[in-house]
Image: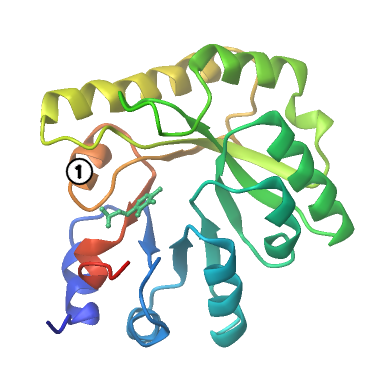
Amino acid sequence: MSTDVSLNLMEIRTTIPPGVTLVAVSKFQPVELLMQAYDAGQRIFGESKVQEVTAKQAQMPKDIEWHFIGHLQTNKVKQITPFVAMIESIDSLRLLKEVEKCAAKDHRVVDLLLQVHIAQEETKFGFSHSEVIELLRAYPQSFWKNSSIRGLMGMASFTDDEAQIQKEFEQLTSLFEVLKQSNLIDPAVFNVLSFGMSDDYKLAIKQGSTNVRIGSKLFGTRNY
Ligand SMILES: *Cc1c(COP(=O)(O)O)cnc(C)c1O
């Protein structure tokens, strides 16, 4: 099967309003396909494996912003902090502290999102609502020098049930609103809400997502 990445990208772009960031999720896709998106103007790519993102980063143009979107093991953090633009999948305080330590060594400030558990499945990583609030209360942005906590990320359940997905998205936006009403965050910095993938990104944008992560709709099915 051939995939016309530049055509797909053009079509997807017509459905994404200004102010919403498109992350091209390129995990398990070959560099040739990523380069087709790059040549069509895409600069933000999302990857979920440390080994894969470091290999691709080494081969590809340096003006790409790499977003790490998968579960990240603390012992691998140091491999990506030298170049990664954003880690969307911060799911523990231990991981956050490791990112802070490694980013400091690299003399960088890395943008981060706190991953919130919204799906029904047990297997998806992330904080609960109260854990996010507790974390920001105990460790506000002023505590971090090399980590910029920019917002929240979530993944809905793997289901066709749109009402269920909508309910889960609403959980994320309501937490975001609660935080904005509190003084736990600076709304000028903490302004990214990352939810929505190929099958549900249009709904996500309607619900207030500012960062959609689109893989298969852009690059075709993945070969695992
Ligand atoms: C794979 C992945 C995506 C993209 O999924 P598609 O359905 O292919 O668009 C988005 N977010 C995360 C965290 C992923 O792992």
Q: In this view, does 42 lie above or below 98?
A: below
Q: In which quarter of the image is residue 41?
A: bottom left
Can residue 186 be spotted in the picture?
yes
Q: Which residue is drawn at 64% across and 31% down?
A: 92
Percent position of residue 59, x then y: 56, 86
Task: Residue under label 1, please give it.
Answer: 200
Q: Which residue is drawn at 74% across and 47% down?
A: 99
Q: In which quarter of the image is residue 221?
A: bottom left
Percent position of residue 43, x then y: 46, 72
Q: Is residue 169 above or below residue 24?
A: above
- Using the image as rendered, state which of residue 83 and residue 141 is in the foreground: 83
Looking at the figure, which quarter contains the C terminus? bottom left
Percent position of residue 105, x then y: 88, 57
- Give neighbour class at mark 1: few <14, some 14-19, many 20+ (Cα, 10 Å): some
State left or right for residue 87 relative to residue 192: right
Can residue 63 be spotted in the picture?
no
Q: The residue under label 1 is which amino acid type?
A: Asp
State left or right for residue 114 relative to residue 97: left
